[in-house]
Amino acid sequence: MCSSGVEKIELRGKLIVFEGLDFTGKSTQVEILAKRLREAGLPVTTTREPGGTKLGETVRKVILSKEHMELLPLSELSLFITCRAQLSAEVIEPALAAEHVVVSSRYRLSSLAYQGYGRGLDLRLIQQLNEIATSGRQADVTFLLDLCAEKALERRGEERDRIEQEDLAFYRRVRTGYLDLTGEDPSVHILDATAPIDEIAREVLRLVGLQSLGIGDDGV
Ligand code: TYD
């Protein structure tokens, strides 16, 4: 591998986040990027939301279970915030302090898009809770895997969790939210999620300055 030392130093201690609707391939891209970064000799921590901690994984089950259709939007938000606070304190901050590159599937933007635009909760309230839950930590780079709601739902299987069974109008609001919230932000790169996996992965590597690493024939 032929990554320069300068590139390595720039990425250490940075938080890289993948965002987007369900079914946009976030976890695949997290995996590919983490593998390439590790091959370049960088210490990497991967995370996901909701989850990534013992409590977070338990709360994830509650959030996604169809046994809890009674969850109010505010209750839903507070559960996501609980997961985020635990993940931030237990995983993200210690990893960044140890100079790891942290790569996460979802972070603060998810709550603004899903609970703000999707459920109609107050964006300022979500922003405040996000600030508190993350001690003010913003992602250094965000990749928004953009897909229209129709295409996202075409990828949906028969097995659906509580949120995945929402209707087209909900997914449209969430997608609009993502685009509204990120349009002006230079730290966000919007990528076309209809592109092949290896093409997206190559673009991600280019945008983090590691294009020299390339993507294998297996796409990973
Ligand atoms: P995710 O783990 O990305 O779903 P999957 O593993 O099935 O691809 O996220 C679970 C669901 O939680 C997803 O529908 C998006 C939703 N979500 C919110 O509504 N708000 C949030 O703040 C987060 C982090 C996720």
Image (spheres, rainbow, N blue to C red):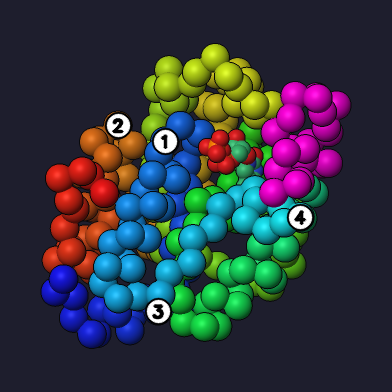
**Could you say which disc has been placed on residue 13 in the image?**
none
Relative side of 44 to 41, left or right: right
Pointer 3 residue: 12
The residue where tag 2 is placed is: 194
Residue 21 image offset from top left, x and y in percent: 49, 36
Specify whether residue 175 is painted magenta.
no
Q: Are marks 4 and 2 in contact (CB under 8 Å)?
A: no
Point 52% across, 77% down: residue: 96
Within the displayed image, which quadrant is ligand 1 positioned in? top right
Please state which of residues 191 and 219 is positioned toward the viewer in this rendering. Answer: 219
Can you tell which quarter of the image residue 107 is in? bottom right
Q: Residues within 10 Å of mark 4 (few under 14, many from 20)?
A: few
Q: Amino acid at mark 2?
A: Thr
Determine which of the numbered discs, if any, sits on residue 55 in the image: 4
**Mark toward the start of the polypeptide (3 vs 2):** 3
Please report whichever mark, 4 or 3, sits nearer to the chain's N-terminal start. 3
Residue of label 1: 24
Residue segment shown in magenta: 57-77
| Quarter of the rendering containing residue 64 | top right
| In this view, the mark in front (4 or 3) | 4
> What whole-number distance in Å separates the C-alpha atoms at marks 1 and 3?
26 Å
Q: What secondary structure predominates along the stretch shown in magenta?
A: helix
- Residue at position x 22%, y 44% in the image: 219
Q: Which badge, 4 or 2, is on the more N-terminal residue? A: 4
Q: Is residue 6 above or below residue 106?
A: below
In the rendering, at what x and y percent does residue 165 appear? 62, 20
Residue 215 appearing in the image:
yes
Q: Are marks 1 and 2 in contact (CB under 8 Å)?
A: no
**Amino acid, disc 3:** Arg
Apparent side of residue 89 relative to residue 137 in the rendered image (left or right): right
Measured in 3D between alpha carbons, the distance from the residue under mark 4 to the one under mark 3, in whole angstroms, is 27 Å
Count neighbours of disc 2 (C-alpha within 10 A) and say few if under 14, some if 14 to 19, many if 20 or more: some
